[in-house]
Image (cartoon, rainbow, N blue to C red):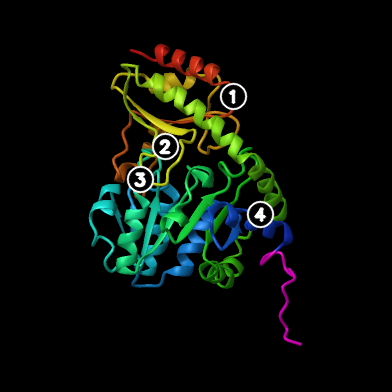
Amino acid sequence: MSGRSDTAIYTRVQNPTVAAFEGLMAQAEGGEAAVGFASGMAAISSTLLALLKPGDRVACVENVYPDAYRFMERMLRPFGIATTYHPVSAFEDEPDLLAGVTVAYLESPSSLVMQAMDLPKVAAHARRHGALTIIDNSWATPVFQRPLTLGIDIVIHSASKYISGHSDTVAGVVVSSSAHINRLRDLTLPLLGGKLAPFEAWLLVRGLRTLPARMRQHQETADLFVSRLAQMPEIARIHAPSANIVPGLTGRSGLLSVEFVPGLDIPRLCDTVKLFHMGLSWGGFESLILPALVGLEQAGAHNPMRVFGVSPHLVRLSLGLESATDLWSDFYGAVMAAKT
């Protein structure tokens, strides 16, 4: 006997329901394999710890997901892994930015300010210098963007968001080549133990069945908001990438942010809306609102919103699946009430 088996014998390492979800995600993203995790942060940390060692360097996009930033600063840096942070334009326009870099950690669009990136160009720069590219694709999902087909090496999702779509699951997933996924399965999945549970995997399989339809409705609502926000003098800037703004991005999700002109009472705005709930997460049926002031007021030395200069006048909206016209009426009325 060889002592080896393809049968799942221990759920912390593999499970049939989890395997079904992983297979669907690999197919959706155009990857060879996938591995599920208990959260998006478990996916991020397990991937980085599997691929990095002391002395390596990470180049990370500015305005990265706050807990990814904290992981790099509070966990990787003490282990001797340095991270530098760069604007989207630097990744695109500085061909030698990634010289000597082990991993380029990307988001497109980025958190809060939603800056989209020319992924084929960045992937080409990375290949020239032998750097691995990792991207968080939670905003676009494989419905609107497939980074692996654009030259990116590894795709990560917070599956708690659009992949689930029902605000009832916390999960993460990584999609890549078989070689990269096998390294995660051999090292960080079993030894860190951040495995995806079978019930959560079943919920995610359910979510994938409606993902294209949900993303189309999120996009329709976001398009309505963007077109009307652009006509409002109270709005200084809209952060909501559209289809084809960069190569490979074929749609707009329901997550966007707006910067108001100084003087608008943002706390009053958030207190006045009725269909939007205050919330940190996004991607579910219900619409959520989150003012940047919440994050900027957090104490501590590792506040990425302060580091990256996020505007205190910024408000993030997660547009759900409720009636688009009802959502707009609610939001517009709250803006009018918040004028001072």
- The location of residue 67, given as percent across then percent down, is 45, 50
Q: Is residue 335 magenta?
A: no
Q: Which residue is mark 3?
A: 63
- First reached walking from the N terminus: tag 4 or tag 3: 4
Q: Which residue is mark 1?
A: 322
- The location of residue 40, given as percent across then percent down, is 53, 52
- First reached walking from the N terminus: tag 2 or tag 3: 3
Q: Give the secondary structure at mark 2.
A: loop
Q: CA distance from mark 2 to mark 4?
A: 27 Å
Q: CA distance from mark 1 to mark 3?
A: 29 Å
Quadrant, the C terminus: top left
- First reached walking from the N terminus: tag 2 or tag 4: 4
Indicate the quadrant where residue 21 lies. Answer: bottom right
How many other residues sit within 10 Å of disc 4, few (<14), some (14-19) or many (≥20)? many
- The location of residue 103, given as percent across then percent down, is 37, 63
Q: Which residues are magenta?
A: 1-14
How many other residues sit within 10 Å of disc 3, few (<14), some (14-19) or many (≥20)? many
Say whether residue 233 is left or right of residue 335: left
> Is there a contact, CB below 8 Å, between mark 2 and mark 4?
no
Mark 2 or 1, closer to the camera: 2
- First reached walking from the N terminus: tag 2 or tag 1: 2
Q: Give the secondary structure at mark 3.
A: loop
